[in-house]
C-alpha cells in the first residue's frame, strides 16, 4: 500500500473542491480517501508513505486524442495547411514506418505524457503489436481505436484487431474506428456501422476537423459527416469523435441525442488553421466534451496544460465573453470527461475502488502562488513544471524528474534519432 499524506486532494468526484485529506492506494486501486483514525493507522502497514508537504494530489490527465508514435514527425512538416501537411508530408513518411520505429517513437511520447501528468492516451495509429509492447513495458495505459481507411473489405481488419486487443491486458483496450470520412469509402463506413451493431460498441473517428472536410462530405453524400455516420448506424451505441470544429446545430443535436463524446484539440486546430471548436455551444446542447493534444506532428507538444489554457481562453474569445468555459469545467474535461470518452469509467476521479491513476501538483512554485483558487491556478497559470509525480495503476512512473518505465531515457532519445535518420533514407 502507498499512503499520500499531509497534502491537499482534488477528487473531482462531483465538484471541483480542494480538501485537506489523504489517499491510500492498494495495488492498482484507491483504497482510502479521507482523514484516517488513529486505529486505522495503527492497523495498516504501508509499503511507502509519500509526504505531500502541502502539495496537491489529483486525478491524472487523460489525453483523449493523440497519435503517440508521430513523435518522429515533430517539427518535420510544420507551417502547412492540413490537406497538404497530411497528404504530401505525413502520409508518405508514415508509409515507411516499421513496427520497431513505432515502438521507440511511442516510448518517447510516454516520457512526455508522464511529465504532463498524463496516464492514458486515446491513440489512433499503426503497427499495434509494437505499440502495445511499448505501453506495457512502460506501465502506461492506452485505449486504441482503428485508423483504417480505404475500401469496404478493410473492415475485416478492424474486427480482427477489436477481438485481438480487447482483454489482452488491463492497461490496454481497443475501440472500433476508422481514420476519417474523407479517407474512407461509403462501403467501409457502412461496414463499420455493421460492426457497431454486431458488437453493440461505440465508434471513434476524426470528424469535422476542417470546413473543407465538411463541405466535401456534403458534396458527396448530401449531408454532413455526423448525419452520415448517424444514418449508417455508427452512433447507435455512442462513440467518440475527434476535433468537431465545424458543426451545425443539427450535428450537435445528433451527438447529444446519441451520447457521443466530442474531443477538442485546440492547439492542433490552431496550428493547422482548422478553426475554433464551438465547445460552449456543444455543452449547451448536452454534448460531453473531452480534451486531447492530437499528435506531435501537428501540435507539436503533448502538453495537457497548454490544451486546458487554450480550451478555455479560445471560448472566451469566440463568444466575446470572459465568463465562457470556466476553469473548473476545463479541469473536469481534461481528467474526468476525457476518461469517460475513452471508456475508462474507473479512472475518472479519486474515490475508493477507482484506479490509482494520479498526479501530484507542486503548489510551492511561483506560478501556483498565492493559493486563491487552486483549480484556476492549474488551468490558467499551471504548466508541466508543476508535475512532481505521475502514478498509473498504482505504480509511480515519474517522480521529481526521474522516470521509472524500465528504460533509460538517453537510450530512448538515441534510438528515436537513429530511427528518424533511417526513415528519411528509406525508399
Image (cartoon, rainbow, N blue to C red):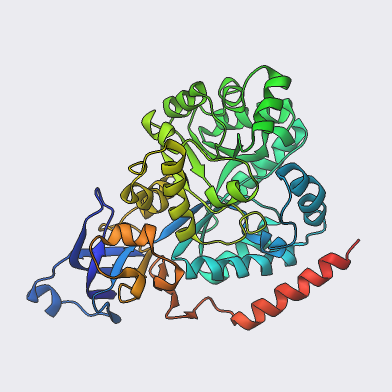
Q: In this rendering, does residue 343 appear at all?
A: no
Residue beneath the point at 53% across and 48% down: 266
Where does residue 14 sit, x and y in percent of width and height?
25, 48
Q: Relative to 89, is 63 on the left or the right?
A: left
Residue 29, located in which quarter of the rendered image?
Answer: bottom left
**Residue displayed at 34% across by 76% down:** 365
Q: In this view, does 193 lie above or below 296?
A: above
Image position of 20 with respect to 406: above or below:
above
The quarter of the displayed image where residue 341 is located: top left
**Residue depicted at 71% across the width and 76% down the height:** 415
Give me the residue at 68% from left, 59% from top.
70
Q: How many numbered marks have been drawn onto this rendered protein structure?
A: 0
Q: Position of residue 309 (x, y in %)?
A: 44, 54
Instruction: Check the picture and name the quadrant holding the C terminus.
Output: bottom right
Q: Can residue 418 be seen in this view?
A: yes
User: Position of 191 compared to 364: left or right?
Assistant: right
Give the farthest residue toward the right: 427
The answer to whether residue 10 is left or right of residue 406 is left
Amino acid at each position: 500500500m502507498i499512503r499520500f499524506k499531509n497534502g491537499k486532494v482534488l477528487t473531482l468526484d462531483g465538484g471541483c473542491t480542494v480538501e485537506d485529506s489523504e489517499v491510500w492506494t492498494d495495488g492498482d486501486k484507491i483504497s482510502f480517501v479521507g482523514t484516517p483514525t488513529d486505529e486505522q493507522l495503527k492497523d495498516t502497514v504501508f509499503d511507502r508513505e509519500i509526504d505531500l508537504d502541502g502539495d496537491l494530489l489529483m486525478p491524472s490527465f487523460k489525453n483523449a486524442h493523440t497519435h503517440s508514435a508521430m513523435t518522429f514527425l515533430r517539427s518535420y512538416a510544420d507551417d502547412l495547411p492540413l490537406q497538404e501537411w497530411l497528404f504530401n508530408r505525413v502520409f508518405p513518411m508514415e508509409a515507411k514506418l516499421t513496427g520497431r520505429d513505432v515502438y521507440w517513437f511511442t516510448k518517447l511520447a510516454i516520457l512526455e505524457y508522464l511529465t504532463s501528468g498524463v496516464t492514458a492516451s486515446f491513440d489512433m495509429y499503426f503497427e499495434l503489436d509494437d505499440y502495445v509492447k511499448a505501453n506495457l513495458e512502460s506501465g502506461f495505459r492506452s485505449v486504441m481505436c482503428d485508423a483504417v481507411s480505404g475500401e469496404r473489405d478493410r473492415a475485416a481488419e478492424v474486427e480482427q484487431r477489436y477481438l485481438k486487443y480487447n482483454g489482452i491486458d488491463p492497461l490496454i483496450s481497443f475501440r472500433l474506428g476508422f481514420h476519417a470520412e474523407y479517407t474512407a469509402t461509403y462501403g467501409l463506413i457502412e461496414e463499420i456501422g455493421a460492426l457497431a451493431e454486431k458488437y453493440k460498441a461505440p465508434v471513434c473517428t476524426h470528424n469535422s476537423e476542417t470546413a473543407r472536410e465538411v463541405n466535401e462530405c456534403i458534396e458527396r453524400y448530401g449531408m454532413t459527416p455526423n448525419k452520415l455516420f448517424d444514418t449508417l448506424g455508427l452512433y447507435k451505441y455512442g462513440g467518440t469523435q475527434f476535433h468537431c470544429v465545424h458543426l451545425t446545430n443539427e450535428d450537435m443535436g445528433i451527438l447529444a441525442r446519441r451520447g457521443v463524446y466530442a474531443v477538442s484539440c485546440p492547439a492542433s486546430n490552431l496550428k493547422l488553421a482548422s478553426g475554433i471548436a464551438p465547445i460552449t455551444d456543444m455543452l449547451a446542447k448536452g454534448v460531453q466534451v473531452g480534451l486531447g493534444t492530437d499528435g506531435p506532428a501537428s501540435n507539436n507538444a503533448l502538453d495537457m496544460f497548454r490544451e486546458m489554457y487554450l480550451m478555455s481562453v479560445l471560448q472566451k474569445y469566440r463568444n466575446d465573453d470572459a465568463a465562457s468555459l470556466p476553469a473548473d469545467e476545463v479541469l473536469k474535461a481534461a481528467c474526468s470527461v476525457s476518461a469517460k470518452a475513452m471508456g475508462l469509467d474507473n479512472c475518472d476521479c479519486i474515490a475508493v475502488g477507482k484506479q490509482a491513476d494520479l498526479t501530484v501538483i507542486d503548489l510551492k512554485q511561483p506560478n501556483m502562488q498565492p493559493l486563491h483558487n487552486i483549480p484556476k491556478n492549474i488551468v490558467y497559470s499551471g504548466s508541466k513544471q508543476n508535475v512532481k509525480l505521475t502514478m498509473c495503476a498504482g505504480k509511480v512512473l515519474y517522480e521529481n524528474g526521474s522516470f521509472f518505465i524500465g528504460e533509460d531515457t538517453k537510450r530512448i532519445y538515441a534510438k528515436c534519432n537513429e530511427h528518424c535518420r533511417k526513415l528519411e533514407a528509406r525508399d
